[in-house]
Image (cartoon, rainbow, N blue to C red):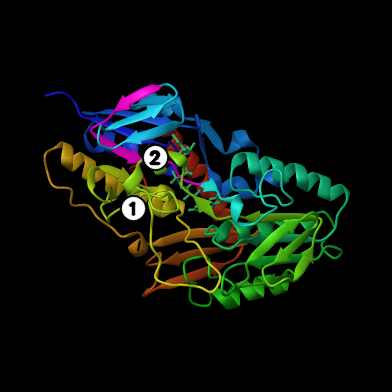
Amino acid sequence: MSRKKVLVLGGNFGGLTAALAVSHELHGDVDIRVISASDRFLFNPSLIWLPFGKRRPADITFPLAPTFENHGIEFTHAEATGIDLAAQKVTAATGTYDYDYLVIATGYRNNFGVVPGLGPDGNAYTITTLDDAIHAGEGWRRFLDNPGDIVVGASQGAGCFGAAYEYLFNVSYRLRKAGLKKQVKLTYVSAEPFLGHFGIGGLPHGESLLSMFLKKEHITAVLNTGMDRVEENRLVLADGRSIGFSYAMIVPPFIGQEVVRSAGEIADDKGYVKVRDTYQAHGYDNVYAVGIAAAVSVPWQTATPVGVPKTGFPTERMAHVAARNIAAQIRGETPRAHEEFGDMPAVCVMDAGNNGVIILADKMLPPRKHGLLIPGPQAHAMKLGFEKYFLWKARHGYVQLP
Ligand SMILES: Cc1cc2nc3c(=O)[nH]c(=O)nc-3n(C[C@H](O)[C@H](O)[C@H](O)COP(=O)(O)OP(=O)(O)OC[C@H]3O[C@@H](n4cnc5c(N)ncnc54)[C@H](O)[C@@H]3O)c2cc1C
């Protein structure tokens, strides 16, 4: 019998983990190919440090081809442009690839369209991609020569609030180091209904802890607000209020990649794949989606739309669930691994320059039994250590390690 073909789209947290985990589950007895638009792995959590020169792109990326080759996985550096579910084929500039099992791990794109004035040619920076963070760093260096007030925020529909908070506190830390803290007014603007909501509904004492952090750093918060537009040096809120700035970093909402939309019925209106708790797409038992590409639903509605952060930890968990199920199917068994996104533990560190908060909860989404926030400098040390550990683990393909 010919070996089964597993095709993985995307080579970052979700794709890299899924491809290597399938190979591990089947002891290499399977043909796996990864097609990725980027030829490098990017440790996105460290993008918060890049604009300040604390990290260079080479520090937080590594080439994907050697990692996959060392594990007997084919790697194609190309953007997938079409998915034909009926024919079980994926199209890319480099050719057409057929599959028995498909894993979609194509992550996110910025949706700058929600607020006029956001985006690469707009009036505020963002840090959610490598290019954006490099650009934000160029702006930061210009700012240091000619300082003024700063706005850091997350727009309506954004989900990646952790990155906004981390950038906010890192900006505050950098301002102090540059001797600018007293003269610069720093404002946090967010769609969250309350401080420390984080897009996961908040955690016990989270609001008071974040309030304390903001007070200590003399940061003003404007919450539960949409943004109308970003003009040159001025953020106009949905209710007409405006805040002036010399430098602004705003996290936009994310949407799925165009290629997911090409798959038709399995895509939702944001371009994410509608999945079951096995990470199989609805209606297609041989098609999986993991990480940010997988659609998740949240148990609340907020006055200002708030997205959900699909962070690295649940992304890896989804990839392992998918890998176990693909391996089971290839062995002729029923796929039995399952775990709802909302039931996965929340494990995260919010960095604050030389300080931070360790965030732990038994579940990503409420109702929860346990949630714990541990502030202190050990959180910053933990983030530094985790970055090194994760890049080592991923580069060597040791995805079975925690
Ligand atoms: C600034 C920032 C800070 C963050 N901080 C943290 C943190 O502290 N802790 C945490 O747990 N998480 C954090 N996250 C979230 C974390 O980065 C995500 O959970 C993770 O990146 C999701 O991985 P993914 O593989 O699903 O998607 P992505 O990382 O988006 O990877 C998608 C991959 O697919 C490729 N791709 C895209 N389109 C195509 C296509 N058409 N064809 C082929 N390949 C394609 C891309 O090139 C990329 O390699 C942060 C995210 C950001 C942006």
Q: Is residue 237 above or below residue 107?
A: below
The residue at label 1 has a CB less than 8 Å from ligand 1: no
Q: Quadrant of residue 244?
A: bottom right
Point out residue 340 in the picture as x, y percentages from the top left corner.
Answer: 31, 60
Point out residue 56 in the picture as x, y percentages from the top left corner.
Answer: 65, 37
**Which of labels 1 and 2 is toward the front?**
2
Which residue corresponds to the image point at 25% horizontal and 52% vertical from the top-left? Answer: 278
Point out residue 196 in the picture as x, y percentages from the top left corner.
Answer: 56, 70
* Residue 101 is a magenta residue: yes
Residue 98 falls left or right of residue 245: left
Q: Which residues are magenta?
A: 95-108
Residue 54 in view here: no
The residue lying toward the viewer, choosing from 358 and 3, is 3
Residue picked out by circle 2:
262
| Tag shown at residue 215 | none
Which residue corresponds to the image point at 69% horizontal and 54% vertical from the top-left? Answer: 249
Q: Amino acid at mark 1?
A: Lys
The residue lying toward the viewer, choosing from 351 and 36, is 36
Q: Residues within 10 Å of mark 1 (few under 14, many from 20)?
A: many
Residue 375 in view here: yes
Q: Quadrant of residue 3?
A: top left
